[in-house]
Amino acid sequence: MNAYSGFIAPSKSPLVWKKIKQQVPYYCTYPASNKTIFPLSWGFDNEVFYSSIYQSAVPAELQVKGDNGERLLPSGLDLASVFGNQFAENLLSADLQKYPSLKKVIENLKSNFKNNSNNSDFNNTLYNQWLNAIAVQWSDTVSSINGNADNNIWQTKRLQTGLATWATLRHATLLVNERVSAECGEGGFEDILMRAPRGFVEPDPYTFGSIAALFENATSYVSKATANKNDITEKSSLYDGIMLRLKDAASEARLFQAMAEKEKKGLQLTKEEHEKILYIARVAEHLFLVFNSLANKDYALSHPDPMPKIVDVAGDPSVSNYLMAAVGNSMEWNYIVPFYGRHQIVKGSVYSYYEFESNQLLNDSEWREKVGQASFLPWIKPYISKQTVTQRPQTNY
């Protein structure tokens, strides 16, 4: 159990094992009293979802219910709101009116996160560090380079990206994650130079910095002691390879952090930095395939699974449907950015996020068959173009 404890959040339940010491996380407001043999992860997202639905065991003023009944399932918007995303909280306005106590619950969770996000519960586990990185990405400190002109679609894109990233995290930790359920009981002018279009980096240095920190912290969980054991002679070289790739990934993220800082200051990127953007997909794909190969017993490169994946995050069939959070196919993102006194459209690939109730659990294969007919969430749908790309642009650049 200690081998994977650094990768998941602590459990909210005490353990029966006397030799394994594990403290219930500080952010857990309602710890479980029954001892458990296998500790399930209780990340801060679980704490949010548990608190934002009806629980009979909590104080009456924090029971999430309204005139028409109890709130039985949470929403990914709950998590984003607690992490300080005002756009998400605005989207929650209907639920906040329907369940009056939900506002107080959200505010309490915000205080909980602020008070505990720097504690060991977060800093010592990669799971909660990932949540911290998502919180940075969701913060309102990063605005569109175009100001208020495209603020709504900018915020929609960033919210959707964060939710899809969170769904990916839940998917990766499905077997060890606890599912919550309700309880019913400028300077002058310059010449316009018609240069070849260049790439652009999301002007969010804080998120790039958090991603880099994730990779840097991951190196502490690669045990040198294991690499020195004599049972497998290749372990030492495997250890060195993993460490090298983790450091390479962190270094790449730091480079993009520096580029984002320059863009926020209105500074031009260098030729070398534009080349980094040009080849980022190649670099990211290579690193992904290398890390993915570690799950292969022969450490061989394998074909990764398609992007769409689905995970159940809340619900209990005895009182409600399941809440399914899913990642769909990648989407094309078109964005207008400043370019040498004029503007250009830059294109990129972004996550798609889906969330819906289901009376049965779905696996990844079943979801991939349905994803083409799935409906976008109401707050995403207005920004989905009905046009399709008929051919790839032809260019010499």
Image (cartoon, helix red, strand yellow):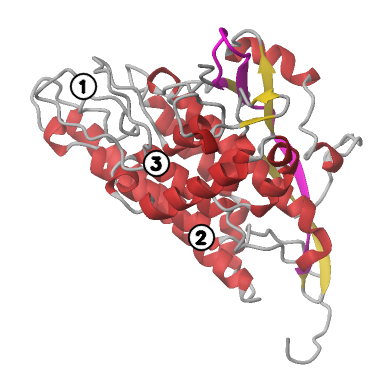
Q: Position of residue 13 (x, y in %)?
A: 29, 25
State yes or no: residue 391 in magenta. Answer: no
Q: Start and end of the magenta stretch?
A: 311-338
From the image, tell me which residue sits under label 2. Answer: 206
Give the answer, above or below, for where 18 lies relative to 162: above
Tell me the crowding category of disc 1: few under 14, some 14 to 19, or many 20 or more residues within 10 angstroms, Cα based.
many
Mark 1 to mark 2 CA distance (whole Å): 37 Å
Residues under numbered marks 2 and 3 in contact, where contact means CB atoms less than 8 Å apart: no
Q: Position of residue 24 (x, y in %)?
A: 27, 34
Residue 15 disc label = 1
Q: In which quarter of the image is residue 130?
A: top left
Mark 2 to mark 3 CA distance (whole Å): 17 Å
Residue 396 visible in image: no
Among the two numbered marks 2 and 3 on one chain, the one whose residue lies closer to the N terminus:
3
Q: Which residue is drawn at 63% across and 42% down?
A: 161
User: Residue flagged by tag 1: what amino acid is it?
Assistant: Leu
Residues under numbered marks 3 and 1 in contact, where contact means CB atoms less than 8 Å apart: no
From the image, tell me which residue sits under label 3. Answer: 128
Give the answer, above or below, for where 16 lies relative to 51: above
Task: Kindly report which numbered mark, 2 or 3, lies closer to the viewer in this rendering.
Answer: 3
> Magenta-highlighted stretch: main secondary structure?
strand
Quarter of the figure with the C terminus: bottom right
User: Residue flagged by tag 3: what amino acid is it?
Assistant: Asn
